[in-house]
Amino acid sequence: MARIADRYVLREAAQTWFAVTAVLLLILVTNQFASVLSDAAASRLPKDALLQVMGLTSLQYLTILIPVGLFLAILIALGRLYRDSEMYALMACGIGPVQLYRPLVLLAGAITLIVGYIALVVAPGANAEVRRIAQEMRTRSDLSVMEAGRFVSFGQADAVVYAEAVSPDGRLRNVFVQRRNEGGVEIIVAAQAWQEMTANPDVRMLTFADGRRYEGEPGQPQFRIIEFARHGIPYSLPSEIAIADEPESRSLGALIGSDDAADLAELQWRLSAPVMVIVLTLLAVPLGHSSPRQGRYAGLRAGVLVYITYANLLGAARVWLERGRIAPLIGMWWVHVLFVAVALLLLANRYGWWRRLVMRRAVT
């Protein structure tokens, strides 16, 4: 009977976890899609890497989504069992809180391994790859980023380029360019423009055909106007800026061997993700208790409040550790210990462990 009950509870929790996590991930991806599109429209990300960036950023958020998904799934699954009086039937067969933890710990153990691998290995690599893509985009300041009908910043100079149309071979039609220099403003209007390579790989030549060039200082009546059949302007590509080795992108080995407070905080933050899976599983069983009249989602309100408090305390502990206000030995571990104690107190209160202890002392 115990094995049948274990399989039943395990299946109910696993199916609910998969559904809840999928919904949370869909919401995140939808929100992330708008943010990535905004970056691509502002030429901060290459358009051919949108799906890759979305996938990489989603991997980073899985360390948060999977634990909270499991927590909510257990609350919902237990709430349904209580609502349909199935939990009382299980209790009549000798399935108590300790036995109830058996299948849930199996599920939580597997998920802990997954979350640990993502938090310690996958997410830092994804973060570094997103930053590399953004850095690559900053160095791609040539006509490949041009789009018809959009103003685009160009080169290292304070220049803006607009083209009414862009042909498949990269030629621009009805071009407008504005550049600022020490002497004022330079504006070029041309029928066509295209890019040419130079002997220097870091320098490009933007060549215009059939246009005019206006030079002058804003607010002054004197302007110089030059008509040309062909005119070229050299521009330098942005120099590659070294990507800062931030803690979020560093490998696990580098964090372990570091004494820097920020690295220690990042290491404990990553380790907190799998630890949180176990702690939230302990909390979910007493919080998921409800009467048949309370409904399936009775424990969600308290569960969400507990999770928000848990997550905020972890965030505060991380900041304190980064600023050296708390010893690394204490770090963020005190938050996990606190909520393990809360789970034990809830279990003792929910299942009458205090009353049993008092009665035993009274008998003796």
Image (cartoon, rainbow, N blue to C red):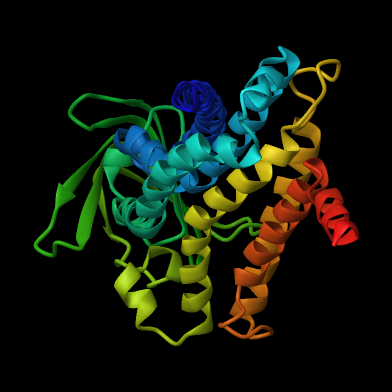
Q: Nearer the viewer, residue 56 or 260?
A: 260
Spot occupied by residue 171 in the image (x, y as percentages of width and height): 24, 32
Question: Which residue is situated farthest in the front direction here?
Answer: 364
Q: Nearer the viewer, residue 218 or 70?
A: 70
Q: Which residue is drawn at 44% across and 40% down?
A: 106
Left-right relation of 175 to 2: left
Question: Which residue is situated farthest in the left direction here?
Answer: 199
Spot occupied by residue 251 in the image (x, y as percentages of width and height): 32, 68
Spot occupied by residue 174 in the image (x, y as percentages of width and height): 37, 29
Quarter assignment of residue 220: bottom right
Quarter assignment of residue 52: top left
Which quadrant does the C terminus fall into?
Answer: bottom right
Spot occupied by residue 285 in the image (x, y as percentages of width and height): 67, 38
Q: Residue at x 75, y 53 (%)?
A: 309
Looking at the image, residue 240 lies above or below residue 48: below
Q: Nearer the viewer, residue 103 or 354?
A: 354
The count of marks equals: 0
Using the rendered image of the protein, determine whether residue 182 is visible from the camera's viewpoint: no
Looking at the image, residue 127 lies above or below residue 73: below
Left-right relation of 257 to 21: left
Left-right relation of 40 to 223: left
Left-right relation of 234 to 184: left
Q: Which of 73 and 92 is in front in this view?
A: 92
Quarter assignment of residue 341: bottom right
Question: Which residue is situated farthest in the top direction here?
Answer: 84
Q: Which residue is drawn at 54% across and 23% down?
A: 16
Using the rendered image of the protein, determine whether residue 172 is visible from the camera's viewpoint: yes
